[in-house]
C-alpha cells in the first residue's frame, strides 16, 4: 500500500511525484463514482462488475509495463548517467501509477464487498461477483509485488555504473576501409508476412509474462486464476500455430521473391522488365507423371451412322522441358493411356478404343508471382496411335476385328505447385486432349474423334545442372 512513499523516500535517490498520477487518480475516482451512482440507482451487479473488469484490465496492462521495465533494468550489465536518469524517470512514472492503482483496487474491493453484503439473497445471482472479489484481491497482491520488484531493480541498477569509455586511436590513413555490406531488400509481400510473425511473437511474449506473474503472485487453486491461465494457454497455442504457417509462407515467399531480370527471349516483359518471379533457372527440367480421367468418342464405321461412346482412361507421360527464359519453355513429350471407351450402334455395330500412345511437343509459360502459387500453362500437338476393336454384334451375326490406327492430337493443360515448401517437386493439374484417328479395318473405313479430360500428377526436377 505504501509503495509510492517507499519509492519516493528511498535512501539512495529521490524520485519526484509524477504529474500523470493525478490524472490516474481522477480516472479511477471517476470509475468509483460511477460504481456508487449505479448502485444507488438500483442498477444490476452486471453493470457495476463491468467497471471493475475495466479497472482490472487496466491494472494488468500497467503491471506488464512495469515487469518489462524491471526486466530491462535487471538485464543491463551496467548503465551510464544518462541511461540511469532515463530508467529513473520511467520507473518514477510507473511507481506513481502503481501506487494510485493499488489504492483504487483496495477501494474497489471494499466497495464490492459492501455492495454484495447489502443485496438480498435472490439478487446475489451474478456468478462474476465471487470471481471478481478473488481477482481484485490477487490483483492487489500482484501490483504490490510488481512495485517492490521495480524498486529493487532500480536500486540494484544504481550499483552497476559503466566504466568510462576508452577512445581507440584512429586507424592508419593507409589502412584500406572495410567493404560496405549491401542492404538486403525484400519484396513487399514477404515484408508483410514477416511483420505479422513479429506481431504474433510479441503477443506470445506478453501473454507468457502475464502468466509468469500470475503464477508467482496468485493462488493457483482459485477457479478464476486457473480459468485465466487456461485461456492464455489457448491463445498462446493458437498464435504459435499461426506463426508456424506464416514461417512456411515466408520461406516460400523469400524463395520466390527474386530481383527483376531483363533480356530473355519470350520472357513476358512488363514495362521493359521481366516480371519478378521465382522461375526455374535456364536449362532442362524433366517431368514424369501420370493421369486418370474420362473420355468420349464420336465413331464412324463402314456405312453405319455415326455413333458415340464413353469410358475411362489411365496412363503416364514424360516431358523434357527446356526453359528459354525463367518463364517460357518448350519440350518434347511422349505418353500413353489405357482406355476403355466403348460405343454401340442400334444396328449392332460397336467400337472399343483400348489404348492411345502419342509422341509430340509442347510450349508453355510459368506464372511465378512472389507469394503466390506457381502455375504452368501449356499447349501441345502430337502424332497418335490408337488401338481399335470394331465389329458387329447382332442376333444373327457377330464379327470383331482389331487394328492400330494413326492420327494426330492437340492438347492443353494447367499445373499447380500446391506445396512449394513441403513438396516443391510435386505438381497437380488438369489436361484436355483431342485426338483424331482414321484408317480401315477389314476393308471398312473406320475413324473416331476422341475427347479425353484427365487429372495429372507429376514430379518435376532440373537436370544437367
Image (cartoon, rainbow, N blue to C red):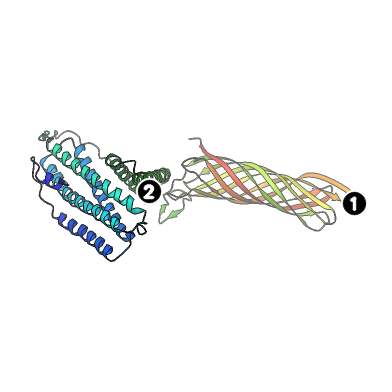
Which mark, residue 395?
Answer: 1
Residues 84 and 397: in front is 84
Q: Residues within 10 Å of mark 2 (few under 14, many from 20)?
A: some
The mark nearer the N terminus, 1 or 2, is 2
Residue 294 in the image: state x and y as whole percent: 67, 50
Residues 302 and 86: in front is 86
- Mark 1 falls on what kind of element? loop
Compared with 156, 299 (above or below) is: below
Distance, label 1 to label 2, CA atoms, is 72 Å
> Residue most toward the bottom?
41
Q: Quadrant of residue 316?
A: top right
Which residue is drawn at the image coordinates 25% and 52% (left, top)?
109
Left or right position of 427 against 101: right
- Mark 2 falls on what kind of element? helix
- Residue under pointer 2: 193
Compared with 218, 437 (above or below) is: below
Residue 335 in the image: state x and y as whole percent: 64, 42
Q: Residues within 10 Å of mark 1 (few under 14, many from 20)?
A: few
Which mark, residue 251?
Answer: none
**Viewer-side label of 1, 2:** 2
Residue 147 in the image: state x and y as whole percent: 19, 44
Residue 341 visible, this orientation: yes
Amino acid at each position: 500500500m505504501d509503495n509510492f512513499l517507499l519509492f519516493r523516500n528511498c535512501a539512495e535517490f529521490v524520485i519526484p511525484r509524477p504529474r500523470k498520477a493525478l490524472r490516474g487518480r481522477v480516472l479511477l475516482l471517476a470509475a468509483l463514482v460511477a460504481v456508487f451512482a449505479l448502485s444507488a440507482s438500483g442498477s444490476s451487479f452486471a453493470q457495476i462488475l463491468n467497471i471493475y473488469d475495466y479497472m482490472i484490465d487496466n491494472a494488468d496492462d500497467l503491471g506488464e509495463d512495469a515487469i518489462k521495465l524491471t526486466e530491462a533494468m535487471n538485464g543491463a550489465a551496467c548503465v551510464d548517467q544518462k541511461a540511469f536518469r532515463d530508467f529513473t524517470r520511467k520507473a518514477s512514472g510507473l511507481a506513481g501509477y502503481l501506487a494510485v492503482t493499488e489504492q483504487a483496487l483496495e477501494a474497489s474491493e471494499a466497495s464490492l464487498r459492501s455492495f454484495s453484503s447489502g443485496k438480498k439473497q435472490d439478487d446475489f445471482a451474478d456468478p462474476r461477483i465471487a470471481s471478481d472479489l478473488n481477482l481484485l484481491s490477487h490483483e492487489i497482491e500482484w501490483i504490490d509485488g510488481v512495485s517492490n520488484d521495480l524498486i529493487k531493480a532500480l536500486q540494484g541498477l544504481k550499483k552497476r555504473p559503466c566504466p568510462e569509455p576508452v577512445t581507440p586511436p584512429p586507424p592508419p590513413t593507409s589502412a584500406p576501409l572495410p567493404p560496405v555490406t549491401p542492404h538486403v531488400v525484400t519484396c513487399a509481400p514477404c515484408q508483410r508476412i514477416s511483420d505479422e510473425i513479429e506481431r504474433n511473437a510479441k503477443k506470445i511474449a506478453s501473454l507468457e509474462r502475464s502468466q509468469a506473474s500470475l503464477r508467482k503472485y496468485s493462488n493457483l487453486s482459485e477457479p478464476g486464476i486457473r480459468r485465466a491461465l487456461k485461456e492464455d494457454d489457448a491463445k498462446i497455442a493458437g498464435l504459435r500455430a499461426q506463426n508456424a504457417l506464416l514461417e512456411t509462407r515466408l520461406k516460400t515467399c523469400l524463395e520466390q521473391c527474386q530481383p527483376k531480370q531483363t533480356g530473355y527471349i519470350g520472357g513476358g516483359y512488363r514495362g521493359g522488365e521481366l516480371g519478378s518471379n521465382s522461375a526455374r533457372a535456364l536449362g532442362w527440367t524433366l517431368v514424369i507423371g501420370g493421369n486418370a480421367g474420362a473420355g468420349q468418342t464420336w465413331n464412324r464405321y463402314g456405312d453405319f451412322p455415326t455413333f458415340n461412346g464413353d469410358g475411362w482412361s489411365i496412363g503416364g507421360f514424360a516431358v523434357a522441358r527446356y526453359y528459354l527464359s525463367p518463364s517460357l519453355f518448350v519440350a518434347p513429350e511422349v505418353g500413353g493411356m489405357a482406355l476403355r471407351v466403348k460405343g454401340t450402334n442400334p444396328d449392332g455395330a460397336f467400337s472399343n478404343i483400348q489404348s492411345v500412345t502419342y509422341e509430340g511437343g509442347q510450349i508453355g509459360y510459368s506464372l511465378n508471382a512472389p507469394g503466390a502459387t506457381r502455375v504452368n500453362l501449356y499447349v501441345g500437338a502430337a502424332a497418335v496411335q490408337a488401338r481399335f476393336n470394331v465389329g458387329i454384334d447382332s442376333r444373327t451375326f457377330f464379327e470383331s476385328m482389331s487394328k492400330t490406327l494413326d492420327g494426330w492430337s492437340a492438347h492443353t493443360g494447367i499445373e499447380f505447385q500446391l506445396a512449394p515448401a513441403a513438396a516443391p517437386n510435386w505438381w497437380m493439374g488438369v489436361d484436355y486432349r483431342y485426338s483424331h484417328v482414321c484408317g480401315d479395318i477389314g476393308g471398312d473405313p473406320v475413324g473416331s474423334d476422341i475427347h479425353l479430360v484427365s487429372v495429372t500428377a507429376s514430379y518435376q526436377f532440373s537436370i544437367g545442372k
